[in-house]
């Protein structure tokens, strides 16, 4: 199945939380979550009893939608996290947060993860001075991420830094220089995401 190309905020309404898919609308108070805080569709306002399977599935879908991954990508990433030492859920969250597109977004260099992904794909972002075009690239401690000097996205990146929220503790942002540094890899307490990874683990372990 290809990447979802429909209305972005419809995904947030379906999950019942703001997934950060529309930065400007949310900042302007025009978010669909604020205007219509109920699931989309004819029966969105009705009360539906969710099964255990549905609850676990929704947890997985929420994470997929938030980080912009396809089903196969997400399943492969979970399998990798599950084979590593430690707790599978926390490993999964760390891998998701360390994706280059997410790091660009967390540094405030892009208004949304989708915009950050586009910046990376078009090689406007450098890691340690080298241009990369893989949004799934995972950063390491000490990596330097920056907007390429003279890039056409500089005005958009600066506009994003003006409205960016606080930078996570594991990252150090330099908005004036349109760059940032990975101080260390994140632990679960560093990740402000409305995701219950325990339910994702249960979904794949059923």
Image: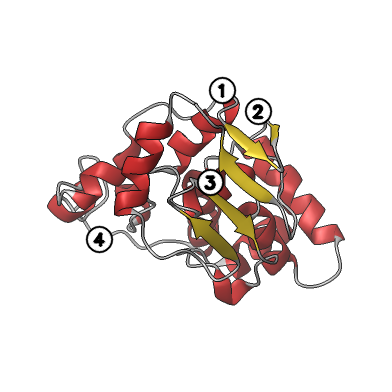
Residue 171: % across, % down: 58, 63
Separation of marks 2 and 1 at Cα, in angstroms: 6 Å
Q: Residue at x 17, y 55 (%)?
A: 34
Circle 2/circle 1 CB separation < 8 Å: yes
**Disc on res. 122:** 1
C-alpha span from label 3 to label 1: 14 Å
Answer left or right for 168 relative to 184: left
- Mark 1–mark 4 distance (CA, rounded to whole Å): 44 Å
Label 3, label 2: how many angstroms apart (C-alpha)?
13 Å
Q: Which residue is mark 4?
A: 47
Q: Which residue matches tag 2?
A: 133
The circle on residue 104 is: 3
Q: Quadrant of the N terminus?
A: top right
Q: How many residues crowd around disc 2 within 10 Å: few (fewer than 14), some, or many (20 or more)?
A: some
Q: Give the quadrant of residue 72.
A: top right
Determine the image quadrant of residue 124.
top right
Do tag 2 and tag 4 residues touch (Cβ < 8 Å)? no
């Amino acid at each position: 199945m290809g990447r979802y190309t429909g209305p972005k905020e419809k995904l947030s309404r379906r999950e019942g939380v703001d997934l950060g898919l529309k930065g400007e609308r949310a900042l302007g108070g025009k978010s669909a979550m604020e205007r219509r805080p109920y699931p989309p569709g004819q029966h969105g306002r009705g009360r539906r009893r969710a099964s255990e399977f549905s609850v676990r599935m929704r947890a997985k879908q929420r994470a997929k939608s938030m980080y912009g991954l396809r089903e196969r990508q997400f399943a492969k990433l979970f399998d990798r996290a599950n084979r590593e030492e430690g707790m599978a859920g926390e490993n999964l969250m760390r891998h998701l947060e360390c994706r280059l597109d997410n790091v660009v977004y967390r540094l405030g260099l892009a208004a949304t993860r989708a915009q950050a992904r586009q910046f990376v794909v078009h090689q406007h972002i450098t890691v340690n001075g080298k241009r990369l075009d893989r949004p799934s690239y995972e950063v390491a401690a000490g990596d330097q991420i920056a907007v390429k000097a003279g890039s056409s996205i500089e005005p958009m990146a600066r506009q994003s830094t003006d409205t960016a929220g606080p930078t996570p503790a594991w990252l150090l942002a330099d908005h004036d220089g349109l760059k940032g540094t990975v101080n260390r890899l994140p632990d679960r307490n560093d990740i402000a995401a409305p995701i219950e990874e325990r339910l994702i683990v249960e979904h794949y372990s059923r």
